[in-house]
Amino acid sequence: MPRAKFQTMTEQMFYMLLCLKNECCGMDILDRVPAMTGGAVNVGSGTLYTLLEQFLQVGWIRETRVEGRRRSYILTPLGCEALGREYRRITAQAEDYRRIFGEGETK
Amino acid sequence: MKNRKRIIEFYSFCDYDGYARRFARMAEKGWLIERFEPFFLVYRRIEPKKLTFYISYFPKASEFEPGPGSEQSEFIEFCEHTGWKLAARSAQMQVFYNESEDPVPIETDPVLQVETIHKAMKRSYLPLHFILLAVSVYNLFNRIRSLVWKPFSMLSSNSWLTGTMIFTMLLAVCLLELTSYFRWHHRAKAAAEERGELIASVSRKVMKAELALGAAAFLAYGVYVAHIFLEGDWYKRLIIVALLIGMALGILLVALVKQRMKRAGLPRGVTIAGIVAAATVFAIALVSSVVAVGVRYYDADKPSVNLDDPPDPPLALSDLMDTGTGWVESRQSSGGTFIMSRYGVSEYLRTGGERWEDPSLQYEIYQVRLPFLTPLVRYAAQQYVDGNHKVMGITTSLYISMNPEPWHADKAFRRAYDRGLLDDWMFFYGNRIVFLHIDGEPTREQKDLVAAALGGHSFPPEY
């Protein structure tokens, strides 16, 4: 099934938005995402650039500062809401899992 | 030892895998891609090493910008931060390399990657191919229309045949390129959305097929140029030399203007305007020069046959009538293709009176050179006869069927109009189509002479 744009987030989108809770620039995100996930999630530089543009377009983030070519961004209330929605979706999935397999099961 | 190497590479603009593999192979041999030039790629010498290459597309970039804009520079900085160094760029294409063994790819989301590539292709690659497709379709449409209207002139014209072949190749190349791209895009989009993977770029086989078509077109043009040189008169040679030199100079001029304006740091719009202006001025100057030389030196009365001393025509005005004290002005022309040869004669008996009243004899003989095409050409000729009376819906004149027996022909037709018959005839003689203009009603003897001279089995002087 094709992924409806921004209806569900990829891991990369999710962690990028998490990083943007505090003001940061693109290069900070490139470092923080693998650090935050123990290297499990990496964002490619091209993907990062495209997603930052798309997040700006839908109003999930806004530009805060421009220093030379370095632009900094921060999450907007709309972005916060989208992130919360994604968190609830993932949590609901985890809850369903626990209901079926019980706490601590990793089958 | 040379530190730079220039190589002509044949890869489709959207063949990211093909380019990446090629650059990696070259790096292993000690050559790193440095820049794209209009006709070749420049490599610089490095220590041979294993490098990972990645072809990325930046949709907002332009071929005419002096350098990467601020947004593209930011993109390049992101890439450098993850170990990807920019080696070269051309239009929307960017070539990055990484010295790490297992670097994080520049694109980690296949859905976004396919979207980005498609956006970049919509910027110049797709419009360019659609424009070329439209040009070739329009040109071929006009050529086919000419073929229907004047099948013999076209099939015996080398320029028509060469042009048709070249535009057919261009059409085929555009169709191949566009269909392979859209097929790739459709499959890549589905694979990215359904399986989260990026499929391989367009197949190299497509480029190989395009190269074969290009080589065929190049060869056809080469044969045409050689033919003009061997058989054409000096005026045709002059035109072909002027156009060949002109085209080469024009391409160099455009490349030079683009390079200079980009180096001067001028904005994209100014560079495009400069290139268009330079190309327009140059094209006007070239065409004007050829026309001026032609007007100054071309002698319309000079026989166009490529012999200084043209042979006697198979049928002359003096064979049909007593020319008395007048003098005969005679012109011959010949030509043809591997499909059909053409031989034409025009003779006027100049008597010193009104020129338009002078008796004349004109004929053109078209002979099919490939025997298996004779039925097809005769069918085309019949279509020509049947449809000749209407040009763009307006009734002009028509050919009516006549008794071929007195002319010893397979078929005979005579041109007519709404008030009567004209002095123009058309005959089918075996693999020949003969057009004849003879003043008045031909006598039996004249018909016999025409049949023997124009319908006989030995074709008039070989050219």
Image (tube, helix red, strand yellow):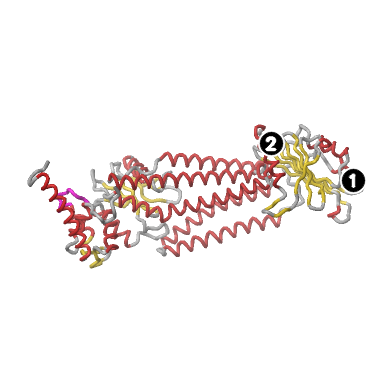
The quadrant holding residue A6 is: bottom left
Q: Is mark 1 on a helix, strand or loop?
A: loop
Q: Identity of the amino acid at label 2?
A: Val
- Looking at the rendered structure, which numbered label has been put on residue B323? 1
Which residue does the image show at 40% across and 40% down from the upper left? B204
Instruction: Report, in whole angstroms, how far the alpha carbon at label 1 lies from the one at label 2.
Output: 34 Å
Query: What segment is highlighted magenta in the picture?
Result: A34-42
Q: Is residue B271 left or right of residue B318?
A: left
Q: Residue furthest front?
A: A100
First in residue order: circle 1 vs circle 2: 1
Q: Give how far across and how far down residue B406 sits, in percent.
A: 84, 36
- B86 versus B222 height, above or below: below
- B55 versus A63 height, above or below: above
Q: Give how far across and how far down residue B177 sits, in percent.
A: 45, 46
Report which residue position mark 2 lands on.
Answer: B368
Q: Identity of the amino acid at label 1?
A: Thr
Nearest to the eye among marks 1 and 2: give it.
Answer: 2
Which residue does the image show at 37% across and 55% down from the upper left? B119
Q: In the rendered structure, are the residues bearing label 1 and label 2 in contact, judged by CB atoms less than 8 Å apart?
A: no
Q: Give how far across and how far down residue B409 sits, in percent.
A: 78, 35
The secondary structure that most of the magenta stretch takes on is loop
Chain ID at mark 2:
B
- Looking at the rendered structure, which numbered label has been put on residue A49? none
Comparing B73 with A19, the one in front is: A19
